Image (cartoon, grey):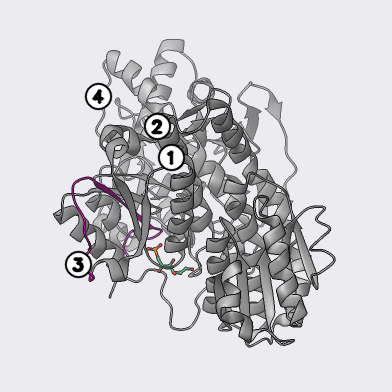
Amino acid sequence: MCGIVGYIGNKEAYQVIIKGLKRLEYRGYDSAGIALLNGSMNVYKKAGKVTDLEKIVAGKNLDANIGIGHTRWATHGEPNDTNAHPHVSQSGSIAIIHNGIIENYASIKEELTKRGYTFQTDTDTEVLVNLIEEVQKKENTSLDNAVRIALNEVVGAYAIVVLNKNNPNQLIAARKGSPLVVGIGDGEFYIASDASPIIEYTPNVVYLEEQEYVVINRDGQYTIKTLGNVEKSHEIQKLEMSIEAIEKGGFEHFMLKEIYEQPKAIEDSLRGRMNAQQGWIKLGGLTEYINRINKADRFLITACGTSWHSGLIGEYLIEDLARVPVEVEYASEFRYRNPIINENDVVIAISQSGETADTLAAISLAKERQALIYGICNVIGSSIPRMAHAGSYTHAGPEIGVASTKAFSTQISLITLIALRLAMVKGTIPTSKLREILYELENIPKKIEETLLLDAQIKEIASIYKNATNFLYLGRGYNFPVALEGALKLKEISYIHAEGYPAAEMKHGPIALIDENMPVVFLATNQSAYEKIVSNVQEVKARKGKIIAVVHKGDTQIRALADHIIEVPETEEILSPLITIVPLQLLAYHIAIMRGCNVDQPRNLAKSVTVE
Ligand code: AGP
């Protein structure tokens, strides 16, 4: 996610802002910039790290006691110097920094272009700053009121800070869907995406609420209003957390933070791409190639690790819904086994980092053989999306923990939309069923929130099995890839050996492993194969295996058989992985913590495997 820092007061703004941007680096970014006001508006911005920005400003005019700074996590427009924030309005009098997505920026840009505006960047943010300028001119009003009016016209999420060249004694900030904190010092104010750039200067903060904006004046006065122009006052709160804790949003580890971010990450990834009520799905990358994709003889999905597990769910979804043959390939195998690929194939590459060497090599091979390459990645402008013909970004925000969690759930969310979109084109499912699934997909974030409430119970189970030496994870249908993913989570952060298996496959060998020392985790929410999964549970119980079962709320049959049951909200069977993976992520996390493992940086692992 982008990082925002604003300052007005008696200190040197540059130092406060640069230091604040470094405090926000953990959020992940690809470019950085700063605007300082000292008679003139001095804007410096650079692709790369904050240290790269520091290099280009060395020796420049940095005297100022008001300014704004930004670290950009690209959503619209490649990560480069031009698209970096701050963005300045056409007249040069307004500078803005922005965290979020303006969904209707294209239509606003079209209207502004008709009114003579020209644009230097591909960003939605440059559209917003020119909309504000246009509103101020047209309404002949104050800048803060122009900000308010403009924000009432935009659809999407934002946290913004606006700097006015004609008023060096004022900062304006607003938020909707992205957080903003105002630090209140002695005759000075700080604005930031979270408290980490603020805490070393003042513990006194005010949190802007949804759809509120604040006008801050150098004289120490500030006014908070709603976008409906109603004045509000919020209690000043005292920060107590350490800086490091704040960077983790108050969570002990990035991994736990990212597990809890899944509802928002899914909402952000679906935003603007589907509408259950009207029954539409919009995936820009897919639309551009929909004819070729629709004619494809088959899909090949290639990835590694967790992303490969998402791919397996993708196979079930696309074949189940769109009736197109799908093959899922480990990228490391695919690239070397001389596979048969041709121009009638569509190859979907799934990758959180967009830099995994094997996946990159696999699509390079497929591209040489004329297949259409479609990327599903989380890092804008990374190598895989740049090599692909088309693609869709997950908007999970940076995933810092090595163990992938929110990337997995947002990948599945996007693949579900792709499968449904294809089913719409092919007419393989009735519109009523499509809308039913879309409505349920909209409910998934709430159901994950509900599932997260089971954390304490899962921690209790973890304490019982933290010293096990082996685990088995068993699932059927859509829950089979979840069993694989659950086993991988446990392996990679707790160093306990774990295997995921199709539940029915157990009797072809692994059942020999079952005894009173073997915890067996069952994903047993299947509606379509429920009786069969009950039999599998009985087979394990008959051999004294310890059974941890993830079941739908109100389950009775498995409750009677299992040693522990974890009851999750019911959902469409095809969406069940989005729910059933959450208890497994938490189980792995708590066991790893209890074993004293480094959850965010497990031994031997890297966040992105950029070498073979
Ligand atoms: C999953 O928790 C691991 N971090 C690992 O398996 C990862 O999924 C794999 O390396 C693929 O990474 P990518 O999604 O960035 O391509």
Position of the C terminus, as image quadrant, is bottom left
Q: Distance between the Cα atoms at labels 3 and 4?
A: 50 Å
Q: Which mark is residue 338?
A: 3
The kind of secondary structure element at disc 4 is loop
Residue holding disc 4: 118
Residue holding disc 2: 426
Mark 3: which amino acid? Asn
Dot 2: within a 10 Å radius of its alpha carbon, few (fewer than 14), some, or many (20 or more) residues? some
In the displayed structure, 464 sits above or below 586; it is: below
**Quarter occupied by residue 563:** bottom right
Q: 454 left or right of 600? A: right
Q: Position of residue 150 (x, y in %)?
A: 48, 22
The kind of secondary structure element at disc 1 is helix
Q: Are marks 2 and 1 in contact (CB under 8 Å)?
A: yes
Q: Position of residue 323 (x, y in %)?
A: 42, 42
- Whether 339 is among the magenta residues is yes
Residue holding disc 1: 322
The stretch in magenta equals 336-355
**Quarter occupied by residue 210:** top right
User: Which one is closest to the eye, mark 3 or mark 4?
Assistant: 3
Question: Could you tell me which residue is drawn at 52 percent across and 72 percent down?
Answer: 488
In the displayed structure, 557 sits above or below 170; it is: below
Dot 4: within a 10 Å radius of its alpha carbon, few (fewer than 14), some, or many (20 or more) residues? some
Mark 2: which amino acid? Lys
Q: 31 left or right of 363? A: right
Q: Position of residue 409 (x, y in %)?
A: 53, 54
Mark 4: which amino acid? Thr
Q: Distance between the Cα atoms at labels 4 and 2?
A: 41 Å
